[in-house]
Image (cartoon, helix red, strand yellow):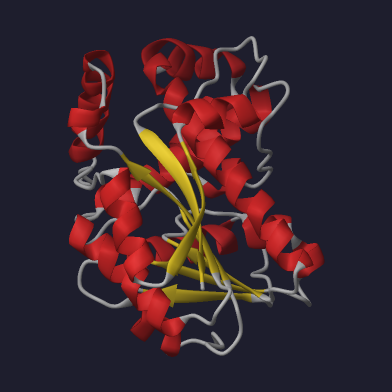
């Protein structure tokens, strides 16, 4: 991210969630606030059916696997969160929150779940301005925790907040590791392992190294890299699953699930006629401390 700008990729992710919510039937994930949180340009595109068809259907049709990746990972994380809440978890940490709207969508949890959005201060500043501009009152259980993952420890950031380290928490970390050096990603896992209570959980997604991808998929990933780099947010992180699992086990995590793109498709997109299918270049993992 450029120092003085909000995250462009966060805007695109919100726009793609909005597009899916408005036009996909059935929707894998419904986000009625996504349209309001993205930029005015994207709001115009998504809300106008003809513009939507021209821009997202024709000009940017290759973003379909990215849309699938975004909505599937959001659905998966919130499904796992609901299970954690049923087990008594009262803290939800959204790492790299971007323009996530969970706190707005789940007002029913305002008295029972404390939500911590951890992200770059520029993105949080822009989001706060957007909430005010759209007349969305900030939920009382939502706390912004500013952090730059490349230079600061997430544990240090959370210690500045009202996060209670002695209680288990559920962490979601979506759409972020792709933009971090692997060293920063592993440092974040290590910091959470030291800070979080036994039984805390994390759901996150990660990119596979190019050498693990078929040639046609490498070309698609390279196009995406060029696009995000032009936005000032280059994709620089990819991790071999075997190496990732070894590192996580050494930190005290257990692996609950590691879903391939195909497994994500079977679980959330089976039988669809619109071609919505997550990319095989990214995986979803669910881990637990202890």
The quarter of the image holding the N terminus is: bottom left
Vertical relation: 185 (above or below) 162: above
**Residue 243 horizontal/vertical position (percent):** 26, 51
**Residue 156 horizontal/vertical position (percent):** 35, 85
Vertical relation: 41 (above or below) 4: above
Vertical relation: 82 (above or below) 198: above
Quadrant location of residue 122? Answer: bottom left
**Residue 6 horizontal/vertical position (percent):** 34, 55
- Is 70 left, or right, of 226 in this rendering? right
x 22%, y 33%: residue: 225
Vertical relation: 289 (above or below) 28: below
- Is 136 left, or right, of 204 in this rendering? right
- Is 191 left, or right, of 71 in this rendering? left
Q: How many marks?
A: 0
**Residue 283 horizontal/vertical position (percent):** 42, 39
> Which residue is nearer to you in this view: 180 or 131?
180
Residue 47 seen in render: no
x 41%, y 72%: residue: 252
x 62%, y 43%: residue: 75
- Is 157 left, or right, of 110 in this rendering? left
> Which residue is nearer to you in this view: 223 or 210?
210
x 32%, y 68%: residue: 250
Taking the view exactly as shown, the residue that stands out farthest to the right is 108
Residue 97 seen in render: yes
> Which residue is nearer to you in this view: 223 or 205?
205
């Amino acid at each position: 991210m450029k120092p003085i700008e909000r995250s462009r990729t966060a805007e695109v992710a919100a726009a793609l969630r909005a597009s899916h919510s408005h036009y996909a039937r059935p929707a894998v994930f419904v986000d009625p606030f996504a349209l309001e949180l993205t930029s005015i340009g994207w709001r115009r595109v998504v809300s106008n059916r003809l513009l939507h068809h021209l821009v997202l259907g024709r000009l940017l049709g290759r973003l379909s696997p990215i849309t699938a990746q975004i909505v599937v990972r959001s659905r998966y994380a919130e499904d796992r969160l609901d299970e954690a809440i049923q087990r008594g978890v009262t803290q939800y940490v959204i790492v790299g929150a971007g323009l996530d709207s969970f706190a707005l969508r789940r007002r029913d949890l305002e008295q029972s779940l404390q939500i911590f959005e951890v992200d770059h201060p520029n993105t949080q500043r822009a989001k706060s301005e957007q909430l005010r501009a759209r007349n969305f009152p900030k939920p009382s259980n939502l706390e912004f925790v500013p952090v730059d993952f490349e230079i600061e420890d997430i544990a240090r950031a959370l210690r500045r907040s009202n996060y209670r380290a002695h209680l288990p928490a559920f962490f979601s970390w979506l759409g972020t590791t792709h933009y971090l050096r692997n060293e920063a990603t592993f440092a974040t896992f290590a910091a959470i392992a030291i800070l979080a209570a036994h039984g805390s959980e994390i759901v996150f997604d990660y990119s596979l190294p190019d050498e693990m991808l078929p040639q046609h998929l490498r070309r698609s990933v390279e196009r995406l890299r060029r696009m995000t780099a032009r936005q000032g947010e280059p994709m620089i992180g990819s991790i071999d699953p075997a190496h990732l699992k070894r590192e996580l086990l050494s930190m005290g995590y257990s692996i609950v699930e590691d879903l391939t793109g195909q497994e994500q498709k079977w679980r959330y997109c089976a039988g669809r006629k619109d071609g919505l299918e997550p990319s095989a270049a990214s995986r979803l993992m669910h881990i637990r401390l202890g």
